[in-house]
Image (cartoon, helix red, strand yellow):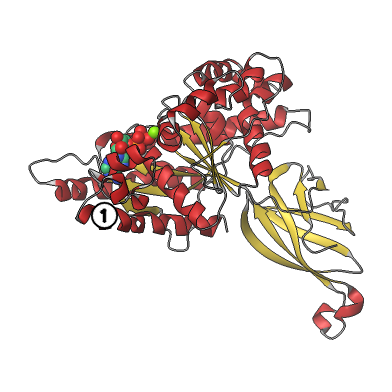
Amino acid sequence: MKEGYLFKMVHKPDWMLQVIDAVPASSAGKDKERDKGYVKYQLIQQGVRRRELYEATQDDFIRMLITDEGDDLIASGTSTQLTTIEETETSEWPVVSEIDSEKEPMKIISIFNNKGGVGKTTYLYHVAHLLAKKGKKVLLVDLDAQCNLSAYAITDKELEQSWNDRGNSIWNIVKPVYERLGDVRNRKPTQLRDNDNLFLVPGDVLLSNFEDTLGNTWSSAKGGDLGDLRVQSAIYRYIKKMAKQIEAGIVLLDLGPNLGALNRAVLSSSHYFIVPISPDLFSIRGTRNLGDKLVGWHKEWNQCKAACTDESIDLPVGQPTFLGYVTQQHNVRSNKEGMTKGWALFGDRVHDAVQANIVDKLKNLDQVYEWKDSNWNLGKIPNLHSLIPYSLEARKPVFECSSKDGLTGAHISSARESSKFFEPIVERILQVVP
Ligand SMILES: Nc1ncnc2c1ncn2[C@@H]1O[C@H](COP(=O)(O)OP(=O)(O)O)[C@@H](O)[C@H]1O
Ligand SMILES: [Mg+2]
């Protein structure tokens, strides 16, 4: 049993056991309790450390007791292989197999709301730049046919090039899968303005063709059709491969505002998701569909996984964890009570709606991140008013805009200081993706 070894339970693909310390029997003699040696390991579920456990061992024999919804599952084995499973009350025993000895650190985070214009793209763009500044290599994927993120992040020329037959737009990546001529293309993303840490897979209006295919192949994928399971997991498999190739630790996905087949495929491919919300009736009502859909998709992905007979197909877990919501204030409508009052009117309702429609529903499925303070409000982004058009024009985040980009007077310092609104969110993300 070696330190760092990672094991996956075949029937519980989102669970992993990682050995964090292993002391063989011979060298553990001083401590009577540990006469037999011991292995300390952690139980990781969907990349989140759930529990740290401790087991006495005989030689390098290990016995692990894992309680899953009341059922005791015991895995045991020797050396670097967990093979035998002891019997308890459960009829079906998980087979435990070893996977890579290296932990896969990459995390995919979707920024999503089924309501448009809530500031998803702007938020993602700013957060990505701050993460890059902190030394994280970030891969951005524009999965919205509107391509707003691409237009913000790269030049028109680069965007047009990405749409060429030889280009790297997301449509060009998946086209062979759409045409049933092959697998995803291995084209490298576009680097952002000489920034070594930021890369973008440009969006493409033609991606809607692929969305149709995703819609048409969903039932047969759930029935176990291997070709269609490959279609459903195509974007996920490309993201994983490319993140590894460019060594990105974080992948941020920008999604269009709907609950269609494309968003089902990519949200289900995400480890986490964040919901930007504006304090209005539409956003509040939208959280209801969002929660319900995610519950349904969880079930349906389980069907896909259960029906898949080919282990070589890398299917996503299909259980994105809710990290929290971000309140956006730029589109708070002025009313006779004034904007602040407008926020006050809806602020509590946003909180309550998130709690009832997302947190309460997904908690049962273990798809809610458990922050110590149980606060899923990850931050508030104020109205940045006219700084935004400067930022769009300069293709830079607001906090990097200066007089060179046309800012004058007090705008220069307001722009620079605007990073403070995004910092707390970035800190939270870094807690999840260290
Ligand atoms: N914090 C902000 N302050 C002012 N305007 C903003 C802010 N965030 C976004 N906007 C503007 O609001 C509009 C919608 O934002 P966008 O990020 O494109 O939303 P979404 O991706 O949810 O559709 C855009 O015109 C954008 O420039
Ligand atoms: Mg957008």
Residue placed under numbered mark 1 in the picture: 412
Q: Residue 80, relative to residue 297: is it above or below?
A: below
375 vs 311, left or right, is left
Q: Residues within 10 Å of mark 1 (few under 14, many from 20)?
A: many
Q: Is residue 12 left or right of residue 330?
A: right
Quadrant of the snapshot with the N terminus = bottom right
Task: Classify mark 1 as within 8 Å of ligand 1 or not, answering yes or no.
Answer: no
Q: Amino acid at mark 1?
A: Ile
Looking at the picture, how far across and down is residue 106, in whole percent? 63, 48
Which of the 4 image quadrants contains residue 410?
A: bottom left
Query: Which element carries disc 1, helix, strand or loop?
Result: helix
Residue toward you, 383 or 369: 383
**Quarter of the image where ligand 2 sits:** top left
Q: Position of residue 431 (x, y in %)?
A: 52, 59
Give the x, y percent position of residue 427: 46, 59
Task: Please name the residue shown 77% across and 52% down the image.
Answer: 7
Percent x, y of residue 33: 80, 80
Left or right of 333, for residue 282:
right
- Is 188 drawn above or below residue 412 in the view shown? above
